[in-house]
Amino acid sequence: MRYSIAILASVLLFSGCKQAEKEADKELVYDMYQPSEMSLLMQQMYEHNQKIKEVILSGETPTDFPEDFLKIHTAELSSFKSRNETFEGFSHLFVESEKQIFSDSSEVDLKDRYNNTINLCLSCHQTECTGPIPKIKKLLIP
Ligand code: HEC
C-alpha cells in the first residue's frame, strides 16, 4: 500500500515539473494542475531574470534586487513536494548569488555574477525538478 502511494506521488510530482517539456500532455496537465505559490514565484523569477539579462546585454547595470525573490523561503510548494535540506541549502545560495548581481562593491564581472546565479537555478533543478531545465538554460548569457 505504502509503495503504491509513493508511486502515485512521484507520478504527480513528475507531471507538475514536466509541464514545460511535455507539449502533447499540456492541455491535460493544465486542466488538473493548479499552480502552487512556488510555481508562480518561479515563473516570476524566470521573467525577472530575463529582464536582468536584457539590461546586462544592453551594457547597463541592473539596480534593484527584487525583494519578492525572498518568498522562495516561505512560498508553498505543490502538495507532493516538501522543503528538504537540499531545497533550503540551494535557496539560500541562490538568493545570496542573486543579491551579488546588484552589489556595487563586487570585484566579479557582472555577466559572471549573473550566470553564476542562473547556474544555481539549474543546480537546484537538477535535484528537484528537471522539466524546466532547457528553458532555464536559455537565461544564460553566452
Ligand atoms: C532551491 C531550489 C530552486 C531554485 C534555486 C530554483 N528553482 Fe525553480 N523550481 C524549484 C521547484 C521545487 C519547482 C516546482 C515548484 C512546485 O511545483 O511547487 C520549481 C519550478 C520552476 C519552474 C516551473 C514553474 C511552473 O510550474 O510553471 C520554472 C520555470 C522555474 N522553476 C524556473 C527557475 C528559475 C529561472 C530559477 C532561478 C532564477 C529557479 N527556478 C530557481 C526549485 C528551485
Image (cartoon, helix red, strand yellow):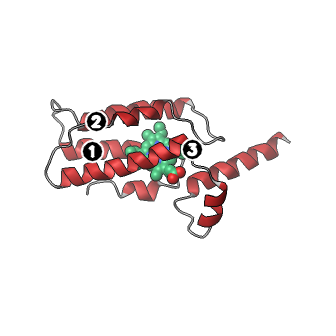
Q: What residue is rendered at 15% in x and 29% in y? A: 105
The numbered mark at residue 65 is 2
The numbered mark at residue 114 is 1
Q: Is the CB of the residue bearing disc 3 within 8 angstroms of ligand 1?
A: yes
Contact between marks 3 and 2 (CB within 8 A): the answer is no
Circle nearer the N terminus (2, 1)? 2
Q: Nearer the viewer, residue 56 or 32?
A: 32
Amino acid type shown at disc 1: Tyr
Contact between marks 3 and 1 (CB within 8 A): the answer is no
- Location of the N terminus (image quadrant): top right
Left or right of 128? Residue 41 is left
**Which quarter of the picture shows residue 84?**
top right
The numbered mark at residue 36 is 3
Q: Is the CB of the residue bearing disc 2 within 8 angstroms of ligand 1?
A: no
Secondary structure type for disc 2: loop
Q: What residue is rendered at 64% in x and 48% in y? A: 13
Circle nearer the N terminus (3, 2)? 3
Q: CA distance from mark 2 to mark 1?
A: 12 Å
Q: Position of residue 33 (x, y in %)?
A: 63, 53
Left or right of 7? Residue 88 is left
Q: Residue furthest bottom?
A: 24
Q: Residue furthest right?
A: 1
